[in-house]
Structures are given as structure tokens and as C-alpha cells.
Amino acid sequence: MITVVKCIKQHSLQIENIDELKDIATRYVAVKNYVYSRYAGINSLLILNNAKKEIRDVWVKAKFAEQWCLPARYWKMALDEAIANIKTEWANIKLRVKSVTLKNENLTEDERSFILYVIKADKLLFSILKHKSIEKTKKIEKLVIREKYIYSLIRRYVRKYKGKVPYSYNKRSFMIDADMYSYKKDKNGLYIEIMGLDRGKRIKVKLKDENIHKGNLRIILNDDTLEIHRPKKVKANKNWSEDKVIGLDKGYKTLIATSEGKFYGEDLNDLLSKETERLSEVNAKRNKYYALHKTYIEEGKTKKAENILKFNLGKKKYNKLKNRHESVTKSYINQELNRFFISDKPSEIVIEDLTFVSWEKKFPKHIKRKLSSWIKGYINERLNYKAELNCVLVTKINPAYTSQICSICSAFGERVGEVFTCANCGKTHADTNAGVNIKNRKNDKEITLYTPYKKVKKILEDRIA
């Protein structure tokens, strides 16, 4: 039986003493941010896999974590979560280094093999990053490389893709394990009792349903309620009966366009545009009040400044409307993706690998305002999740020039909005044209996932010639 992990949510009624939970969340994230600042660097690369002994046990012995005034179980959960995130960041860095290494035409096969080996061996990678001598293993000692150049290249790659030290701004979320909560039921319904800041005391929260969960839970705090998130394994359903490969082009006007000429999520653009316009109008008004607040502060009119913050710059209604829009948008995205998988019944979907494509360069400002940071990742995450849930294989292809060539004759054409124009074949829908090209590239033996875009263009030009 094939299973996938699904997030099960549970909601509470209004909480009277939510301030203590918010205080826990604030201290919890303070622990995480300290761990990020202290252990996300190169110097800590070798201790991440032994964090329990190298970090947690040291903190316990030195009573280091007492500064956050959190029960031990809380700061240990925060530490484990932060270390797991740092490990994920390093895994992403190594993937990026692998990608650019395979695309670098100035490297020999031996040099590529050397770099790919080094990024898998943390001790070798650490030594090179710290300018220390290394002991070459049998697998790499016979490789002929330009040592000084390759070592320098590895350092440049890691420095380029490592980016800033992680930092969490979310002070409304924390994890709890099975010993940090308990469910209690009485004639009024079901409650969850969560470990508080004081020893032996728990915070009692009334829940909307009567489902009892086990294992680690994530607590998400709202203004006066909370959500409980729990990962649960569910059975995957095979929705298709015969092999059917479909190419997908993801867009901002239409959620997805298929290689078969079908469109899903055509109202996404309108949904995002309305919210963008609403927020622009609201923020313009708020900016005037921020300016007025600053003026009152400079003039020493502290009472008026406080009234501006209290009555004109509150976040309760602002966040409520923003969160409502996010919920509606997420619901619409899931609904349209479900409709695609149920209606088209693909056994395999082919999509562009846009993992490392910069959205800053890809889209103009007015589109980037619509494609806010959460929605870009959400669409990709849900598409992959729905595919896994329906036992559908996901194949990623090289995205270079998929929207700039004709799917019929392979000649370069021009894309303007939703119309693609080919000098030989005339006009067609740009998204459908791209979807067909994406599907066709799956079986293209010359253009691999890691073929540099300049080489892709040369291959395409040679085919036309």
C-alpha cells in the first residue's frame, strides 16, 4: 500500500488566556533564531549530525538555555526544529552546487566528478571551505584536476548559494511532543491541555471537534484561537488506469495549462488582482497614518501618537482579511488541481524545473505583487502533493526556451501575453504551446535537466538549420 503524509488540522474555540501561549511562542522562536545565528555557518557543518551530544548536552550541563525561561522540553523541541532546518538548507545548497557544476562547460569530467564527490563528503567539504589540507580517498585521488582553481570554485559556489543566516519572524507557532499535552473530555466537549510556563500547570483549550491526536503536534496561534496541525499517513489513490503523459505549464494568469489544450485555475489572476488592489489601497491609507504618528512623536504629542497606533494602525482586522484571502486562494488552488487530476487522469506529469529560477528576474513588478512569497511555494508544494496522492509520477525537465519555440516546427517565435506567433505555423495559445514543448522535452536525449541554456539554444538553432 502506498501512503502519503497529510496535514490534519484541528481548531479551537476562543481562548481567554492565549497570552501565555503567545509568550511561549515568542520564547520558542527566540531559541530557534539563536540556533540559526550560532550554528548555520560553515564552522558548525561537522557537528550538525551529532547535535544531541555537541549542542543539546552541552546546553544542559552549562544550564545555557535558562536564559529563555522555557521548560526544557520546549527549548529542546526548538533546538531540534532549528537544526533540522539548517540541515535542509545545507541540502539545498549542495543541490544548487550540483546543478551549476553539471552546467559548467569550463570543467573537465574529472573536475565535475571531484566536486560532486566533495559536496557529499562533509569532512572534505569543510576542509576545503576552511582552506585546510585534505586527505584524498581512493575514489578521487586519481582524478586529474586544477586543484587551486577547483577548491576556489567550490568556495565561491557555497558562498554564493548559502545566502543570509536563516531567521524566523513567525512568533505564533511552536511544536509540542506527546508528553507536553493531553486530551480531556467532559460533558461540554473535548479539551486539550498544553504545558505552560509554570511547572505542573497546563493551559486548557476548548476544541471544536472531538478528534484525539497522537505524536508531535504543531500549534499555530491566531488572535484569540489556535490551530493544531498533525502529519498523518493516508492511503494514496490510483486515479488513472492507463499510461497518460501530460505536460503542464504553470502560470500566473491561468494556474496550469496542459499539453492537451485544457486550462485549470483561470480565475486565479482575478482573485490575486482584487486582493493586490485592496491591499494597495489599504496600505496607502495606513502609510498616511504612519507618517502622522511619526510627526506626533517628533512634536512630543505622545498621547495622540498612541491613539493613532491604537485606533488606526491595528493589525487585527488587517490580518483577518488578509488571512481570509489566503484561505480562499488556497481553497481555489486545491479545488482546481483536484479537478485536473480527476478529469485528465494522468499517469505522469511533466513540469519545468524552476527550483533555482529567480522570480525577481522572471516577472515584472506588478506580477510579483500578485505572486506573493507564500503562493509561489504553495502552488509547487500542492501540485507535487496531489500527484503523490494520486500515484502520479512527476518528471522535471530543463525549462530553457520552452515558451519561445513552436511546438509544431520547433522554430523560434514570439510570445506576447497569451498568444504565441510562429512565422511558419501562425498563432496559437502560448500556454498550450509551452505545455506541448514541456511534454516533448521529456524524451529529448540531447537536452538534459542540467544542459546549460546557451547550449540548449545552440541545439535548437542547429535543429532548425
Image (cartoon, rainbow, N blue to C red):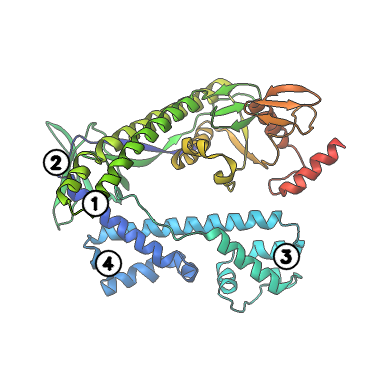
Mark 1 nearby-residue class (10 Å; few <14, some 14–19, many ≥20): some
Kindly report which numbered mark, 1 or 4, lies closer to the viewer in this rendering.
4
Position of the C terminus, as image quadrant, is: top right
Figure quadrant of residue 94: bottom right
Horizontally, residue 425 falls left or right of residue 382, namely right
Distance between mark 2 and mark 1 Cα atoms? 20 Å
**Res. 215 in view:** no
Q: Position of residue 140 (x, y in %)?
A: 70, 69
Asked if the residue at tag 3 contacts the one at tag 1, i.e. Cβ–Cβ closer than 8 Å, the answer is no
State the residue position of label 2: 16
Which disc number belongs to residue 65? 4
Kindly report which numbered mark, 4 or 2, lies closer to the viewer in this rendering.
2
Q: Position of residue 196 (x, y in %)?
A: 18, 52
Which disc number belongs to residue 457? none
Extreme residue toward the front, this view: 299
State the residue position of label 1: 180
Distance between mark 2 and mark 3 Cα atoms? 62 Å
* Dot 2 amino acid type: Glu
Q: Is residue 456 above or below residue 80?
A: above
* Dot 4 amino acid type: Ala
Residue drawn at (53%, 29%) of the image: 255
Which callout, 4 or 3, points at the residue further toward the start of the chain?
Answer: 4
Which callout, 2 or 3, points at the residue further toward the start of the chain?
Answer: 2
Q: Position of residue 63 (x, y in %)?
A: 25, 71
State the residue position of label 3: 111
Q: Is residue 68 above or below residue 247?
A: below
Figure quadrant of residue 436: top right
